[in-house]
Amino acid sequence: MGVEEHRGKAPKRFKFAVVTVSDTASRGEKEDKSGRFLIEELEKAGHERVYYAVVPDEKMEIVGAVVNAFRAGADVLITSGGTGVAPRDVTIESVRPLFDKELTGFGEIFRLLSYEEIGTAAVMSRATAGIIKSSGRAMAVFCLPGSLGAAKTGIRIILNEGGHVLKHAGE
């Protein structure tokens, strides 16, 4: 079976959540351009938003938002922000322990596309993805950097492969 035929059996629509991790956005100091962009693109593609939050760069706030997204019925969760190398960037450290499976290829492809766009600064990205399973269902989680450029790069991959990931995660 070819890739396109295989991908064709994946869900065409899914429920999604977006969680923006940002101390400044959560204080109202910065508009959440990346989060809003992600929501708009997913809704344009016919997917249903079930949860959205802006949380500070704090481990328990991030984990709480992931749990809330799962409880809201999200099939796909996209986090935006907190993936850099600064001491306050703790999204990856907060979310990775929740993964049942990590999709390292997502981060690799994200960095490849980022390299084509921004050059060697792409090494600063720790974008990753994984699957969280509980109560007999799965949620795909994609962790993106917080810039609008990163959201634009990441959504290309997520719109192409989100349903495909869900198909396999639910097997």
Image: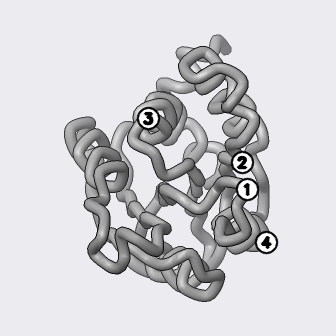
Mark 4 or 3, closer to the camera:
3
- Mark 4 sits on what residue? 97
- Mark 3 sits on what residue? 149
User: Label 4 vs label 1: CA separation?
Assistant: 18 Å
The numbered dot on residue 85 is: 1
Q: Which residue is farthest top?
A: 2
Q: Are marks 1 and 2 in contact (CB under 8 Å)?
A: yes
160 versus 14 height, above or below: above
Mark 4 or 1, closer to the camera:
1
User: Label 3 vs label 1: CA separation?
Assistant: 18 Å
Q: Secondary structure at mark 1?
A: loop
Q: Secondary structure at mark 4?
A: helix
- Mark 2 sits on what residue? 126
Q: Residue at x 36, y 49 (%)?
A: 34
Viewer-side residue, 124 vs 98: 124
Q: Give the left or right position of residue 23, taking residue 168 as reference.
A: left
96 versus 34 height, above or below: below
Mark 1 Cα shell of 10 Å, populated few (<14), some (14-19), many (≥20) = few
Q: Tell me the kind of residue under disc 1.
A: Val
16 versus 66 height, above or below: above
